[in-house]
Structures are given as structure tokens and as C-alpha cells.
Image (tube, rainbow, N blue to C red):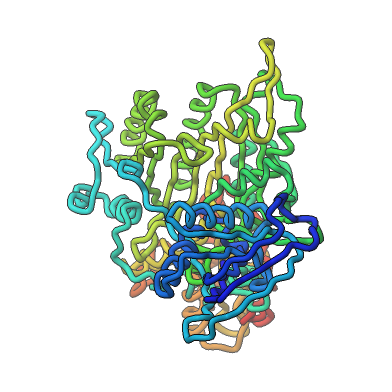
Amino acid sequence: MKMLLIHSDYLEFEAKQKTKIAEETENLKGKLDECLACFIAVEREDENNPEGSVIGAVEEIEKVANQLKVNNIVVYPYAHLSSDLSSPETAVKVLKDIESILKERGYNVLRAPFGWYKAFKISCKGHPLSELSRKIIAKEEKKEKGEESKFYLLNPETEEIVELNEENIDIIKDEELLALAKHELGIKEHKEHDEPPHVKFIKEKDICSYEEASDPGHFRWYPKGKLIRDLLADYVYNLVVDMGAMPVETPIMYDLGNKAIREHADKFGERQYRFRQGNKELMLRFAACFGQFMMKKDMYLLPRYLPLKLYELSTYSFRYEQRGELVGLKRLRCFTMPDMHTVCLDLKQAMEEFEKQFWECLKTGDDLNLSYSVIFRFTKDFFDEHRDWFFKIAKEYKSKTGKDIILEILPKRKHYWVGKVDIAVIDSLGRPIENPTVQIDVESAKRFNIKVHTNEGEIYPIILHCSPTGSIERVLCGLLEKAAIEAERGNAPMLPVWLSPIQVRVIPIAERHYDYALKVAEKLRENKIRVDVDDREDSVSKKIRNAGRDWIPYVVVIGDEEMESDKLTVTVRKKSTLKKPHKEKMGLEELIKLIQKEIEGYPIKPLPLPMLCSSQPKFH
């Protein structure tokens, strides 16, 4: 929100002509003497927290009014202060709320109507404080006592829960879960602007980088990075199809004139890309909810179809993160979200599906070799009613993983969900990267008029939201941060072999070894293994160092001995340390079988680069 505050002898206005967005009002003219005239432009970012913007505006108006010792306030909508305006509905509500609160606090308030062409006269006092401009940042509403969430560490065996606070937080012995708990409680141990290692890795490894010609937080993806993203997308696709999901595709842009879409967007806490095109206010989606909900609304749903799962890889989804919040692949404005929504007949079926999907989410941690930490979040009413069900899940989780769980209890429902689970990876700086989630949505079916036709009549179903891995970018972020942790421990950092852009590099020692090296590479490629040959005019030691910097899982050096014996000298990265590479002798078929076993069950794609290193371009 932007404001221009003018200490005036008087302000007089008269509304002359309506626009298409004019509010209905009988107050078409007015005048106030000895006043503080507040010209206000309500902006798009105010839509994320209109109540907070109202609080911030009222505080600033009161502060200036007290300085000037005036009691008369004019609230005057003035769109010309900004080129990034909110919707008319939001603007009118904000202006009315500012008027209402100021009146409650004893001020004499005159509000000019919104959306009218108006003539006005003003006489500015002309002293040093008579003309002030302000940028208003939304303020968080002060919560009443008892409204805050409470966090607990639970013992599944005894079903005891211990409330966590800053004094007793160290009762959590698992370092990763402790880091997650500190984040949830707002206990900061790192500088906000410490750069995580993955930001360096994505550039070094030719994965991706910021696109300077776009909006901040948008990336360009190079062939290696595109390959990794596509492999992860294929992995999730196969996973959800095995779960019974039906893949669909929906638009990325939606009309906020649709009441259900606007209500759902306004419920979402994160900032959004909103803009006007002609008379329409539009938004870019932040997930695949809108399209899938509109699709389900038009379906004739019967109980025998349920649970019904629709899945979309939402390329792309958008969130208008603040510039200071943008951090590599962890916080960005444009991302790829695997998004599945399940229509369930009732809460009982929804809880059964929630449980199944939770275990599938955990399986992605095993498949990706990532360590997950878990926090369940429930409203108090839901938790009290279904405590036994939750502890059954918690006991099984403890039995399978040996890990504890954090529990958040919300005093009342303020979102569309009554329960959810968030699963996080902890980065090398001890900060969580939120990845998989499952949510029990009790609100959206009614809002979007999604109905199930039963013998007893139409009912509104329960909908589960599930992202089995979290966003593709955050998965890669977690993998790179894990590599950084391994490097800190002295191990050779790497990606899983199935995700490594180049799985094998063949290095001929001399020119006479090139043909043999090419035959080895061709045989590997025939077996769908991504391989390249370092034919550059560098020393062998430099080529080996380059392969290490590229995190190549298997490096094959070809010399006279290898040609004569048909036994390859292979450096196996996952068995190596930073100080000591692990080398093995093996036949070509043995190497092929070793890699095939390692990538079995995962998606396979060919090398997206020329096979000869001398022909591979650098992208930055």
C-alpha cells in the first residue's frame, strides 16, 4: 500500500462519473476542514494480508495525526500512486476497514467513494510535515492469548506428548528433527542470508542459473539440469500411476472473477502473481488445485469411483516470494510441483487414504536416499476425536524408522485443512527444506461445488492434497545439500546414479587408446547408460580431476594394460573419499551389470549432450 498524507486547511470533493468498478454509495460529495488528507493506493501485495495492511495504515495515520494534533481524517482512494493495484473488491474492503477502525478510535472520518471520477480541491498547510509519503507493509495481527499453535514431541509407546519450548527443546536427540523443531518455534541459529552450498553447486555443475532477463526467482535450465528434472518428473509419474492416479493437465492462469477461485486464492497464505488484463483480474496458479477442482466439479462422481485421484505435474506454479526471501532452489518464484488430489467419500475414507499416501511419501525418501523429518499438524478438535488413529500411525512410523515425530496442535481451523503432514529435509546449514505433504481438505468441495451422487442424495466429499516429493526443484535442492553434508564428512559428494547426468566417463590415456575407449563407451550406451569420453587435450590427471568435479559416479581410465587384459580400471565414487579415490578392476560386462542393478526400477533417459567432451559446450 502507498499513501500520500497532506495536512490541509480543507479537502472538498465531488464524485462526477462512475467507472465499471465503482462502489454503490450515496456519499457523492463531502468537505472536511483542518484535516489530514490520506490519499491511498491499495496494492496487489496487500491481497496476501489485507487485515495486516489495514493495521499498518491505521497505525501510520494515527502516528501522523497525533504529531499534527488533528482529529479530522479524509480517506481518499488514489490509484495513481501505484501501477500494481489490488482487485477493486480488496481495495474497497481495505478502505472501509481503515475508515471503520479510525472511527472506533474517535476520529472524525470522511471517506471518498471508490471507482468514481472525482473533482477535488485541497489547501495544503505548507509546513515541513504537511506532505508525507509512506509505503505501508502489512503487519501481523496480534493473536489473542490461547490462539497460538502448540508444538509437542510425542512418545508413541506411552502416547505421552511433551510441549516444546525454547527451554526444553534439547530433549529432542535427533539433530535433524531438532533443527526442524527450532525452525517451527522460531529459534534462529543461522544468519538469514547465509547462502546454502547448493547455490554454488547448480552453477558449478552446469545445472541451472537465474535468468536475469526474467523476474527474480526464475531459472534457466541447462541440459544436465533439464535431464535431472525430467527424470524426477518421470519418477513421480510412475509412482502416482501405481497408486491409481489419473494424469491430467490444466491451465496455469485463472480468472479471479470466479468466486470459488478467489476465495481459495485468498485462503492461501503465500504471495501470488496477480494482474489485470482488460476488465479481468487474473492470477498465475500456485498449485494445480484450481484446474483439478474445476475438472472434478464437472464430473458425475459416484461412490464406486472413489477414492478418485487426479495428478498433474504443474509446470509451472508461481509464488511471489519477496526478493530477500529468494534462495536458490529452496525459495523461488517459479517451480514445478507434482500435485495429486484425491476425492474421498467421507472422512473415514479420507483418513485411510491419508495413511496410505503418507507411507508413499516416506518411500520417496528411501528411493532418493534422503533423510526425512516429520511434523504432523492437526486442529485441536480433529486431534481429540482421532487421537487413537494418529498414535497408530506414529507407533508404526517409530517402529519402521526409529525416529520421533513433532506434533503441532492448532486451537481452531484457519485453513482449508483439519490435518496434514509435512516432511522435510534438513540442509547443510540446519534449515528445513519442506518437501512431501498430505493434507485433509474439508472445505474446497463445497466451495467448488464438487458433489458425489449417492443413493441418499448428493454429498460434498473430502479432498486430499498430496505432493509425494514436494516440488522438483526442492527435491534437487535437498539432494545437493545432502551432497554438501557428505563433503563436510570427507566423503565424495554425488547425486544418485540414476539422476547423474553422466553416469560413466571414459578417459583414454593416449591417442592410441581412443578407439578402444569409444568401443567401451558405445557398449555402455547400447545398454542405456549415460556415458561420455574425455578426448580433450589435457593431462590424464586433469581429466580425472575434472571427472571428480563433475561428480561422475564411475570413471574408467583406458591404457595399454586395460586394452591387453580387457579389465577396466574403474574409480567408484560412492566408495571414495575426498582424499582417497576407490579403484576397482572389472570387466566391461561386470560394470554394466553393476550400474544396471543400481538404476533398476528408476526412469532412464539418454545422455542429452555430445558424447565427446571436446564437443560439449559450457553454458556460463
| Residue 355 visible within the image | yes
| Depth order, front residue of 617/292 | 292
Where does residue 426 sit, x and y in percent of width and height?
38, 57
Where does residue 460 sit, x and y in percent of width and height?
63, 25
Residue at (64, 35) in percent of width and height: 447
Where does residue 153 sit, x and y in percent of width and height?
27, 41
Residue at (56, 58) in percent of width and height: 271
Residue at (77, 32) in percent of width and height: 298
Find residue 86 and report its image quarter.
Answer: bottom right
- Taking the image as shown, residue 8 lies to the left or right of residue 291, namely left
Please identify the quadrant where the N terminus is shown. Answer: bottom right
| Residue 556 visible within the image | no
- Taking the image as shown, residue 354 lies to the left or right of residue 142, namely right
Where does residue 197 sit, x and y in percent of width and height?
43, 71
| Depth order, front residue of 288/283 | 283
Q: Is residue 216 above or below residue 500?
A: below
| Depth order, front residue of 515/581 | 581
Q: How many marks?
A: 0
Q: Is residue 526 above or below residue 296?
A: below
Please identify the quadrant where the C terminus is shown. Answer: bottom right
Residue at (64, 43) in percent of width and height: 289
Q: Residue reaching furthest top? A: 455
